[in-house]
Image (cartoon, rainbow, N blue to C red):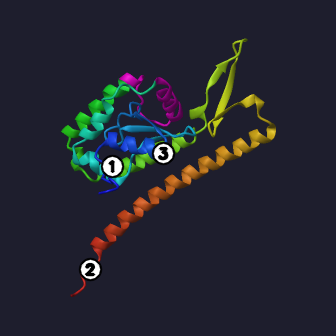
């Protein structure tokens, strides 16, 4: 009580904590409307990694217990910045996700999905939760491959040619100024990050499956005499 530790009350509360502890920039999820009722936030970390949040049992239970009204409140905010929207769309292009044509369209669709999910009483269908978690993990796995692209900018030279840049540890470098050794290390680092994200997602899926199998096993065991 003295430390003022209280349960997360809504997504605005969660955003304040995440910004303070993780230094994340947080935006409404107006790019993946079908996930927005369960995960209405998009985070951008200081190193440029973009991720959908927050597919944890507590946060999912929080918004589902209130029939997605907490998510709807977060999604009513103004449309997410065009730059973040474009980068997420670029990262997810070709992976089969239904993407809106603009942040405003995504905002309208996300709010509509909240109302539709509520009308269908999907907040009272616990079997959907594991699928949502898996879907978010897959999305974030794709986004993890674009960690450095998420922080890239393009500046135009006087001749009108684009000079790609990359931001690492809050420092921006023009790619054509990197030495061959630095480029080789960057390629290796990107490969390791991609593999790490893939293995983390796979581990999370297996952990979820193990919990489900364990519960099923417990239910199937014979009742021992007292």
Q: What residue is rendered at 53% in x and 34% in y?
A: 91
Mark 2 or mark 1, earlier in chain:
1
Instruction: Pick the residue in front: 145 or 47.
Output: 47
Local crowd size for mark 2, using a 10 Å CA cut-off: few (<14), some (14–19), many (≥20): few
Secondary structure, mark 3, is helix
Secondary structure, mark 1, is helix
Q: What residue is rendered at 19% in x and 38% in y?
A: 119
Instruction: Pick the residue in front: 143 or 41.
Output: 41
Q: Outermost residue, right direction?
A: 180
- Confirm whether residue 128 shows in the render: no
Q: Which residue is mark 3?
A: 22
Residue 169: image location, x then y, percent: 63, 40
Rendered image quadrant of residue 35: top left
Residue 28: image location, x then y, percent: 38, 33
Q: Which of the two marks, 2 or 1, is nearer to us in this view?
A: 1
Answer whether residue 92 is magenta in the image: yes
Left or right: 168 in relation to 109: right
Rendered image quadrant of residue 174: top right
* Quarter containing the C terminus: bottom left
Q: Which residue is mark 2?
A: 222
Residue 117: image location, x then y, percent: 25, 39
The residue range painted magenta reads 82-104
Distance between mark 3 and mark 2 Cα atoms: 47 Å
Specify the label residue 59 is tagged with. Answer: 1
Q: Which of the two marks, 3 or 1, is nearer to us in this view?
A: 3
């Amino acid at each position: 009580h003295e430390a003022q530790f209280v349960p997360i009350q809504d997504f605005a509360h969660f955003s304040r904590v995440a910004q303070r502890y993780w230094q994340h920039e947080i935006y409404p999820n107006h790019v993946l409307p079908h996930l927005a009722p369960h995960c209405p936030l998009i985070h951008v970390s200081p190193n440029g990694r973009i991720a959908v949040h927050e597919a944890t049992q507590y946060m999912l239970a929080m918004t589902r217990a209130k029939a997605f009204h907490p998510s709807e409140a977060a999604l009513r905010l103004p449309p997410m910045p065009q730059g973040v929207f474009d980068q997420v769309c670029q990262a997810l292009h070709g992976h089969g996700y239904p993407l809106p044509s603009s942040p405003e369209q995504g905002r309208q669709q996300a709010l509509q999905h909240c109302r539709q999910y509520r009308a269908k009483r999907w907040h009272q269908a616990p079997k959907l939760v594991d699928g949502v978690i898996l879907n978010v993990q897959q999305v974030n796995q794709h986004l993890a491959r674009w960690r450095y692209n998420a922080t890239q900018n393009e500046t135009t030279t006087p001749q009108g040619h684009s000079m790609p840049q990359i931001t690492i540890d809050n420092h921006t470098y023009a790619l054509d100024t990197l030495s061959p050794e630095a480029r080789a290390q960057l390629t290796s680092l990107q490969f390791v990050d991609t593999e790490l994200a893939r293995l983390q997602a796979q581990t999370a899926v297996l952990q979820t499956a193990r919990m489900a199998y364990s519960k099923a096993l417990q239910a199937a065991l014979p009742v021992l005499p007292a």
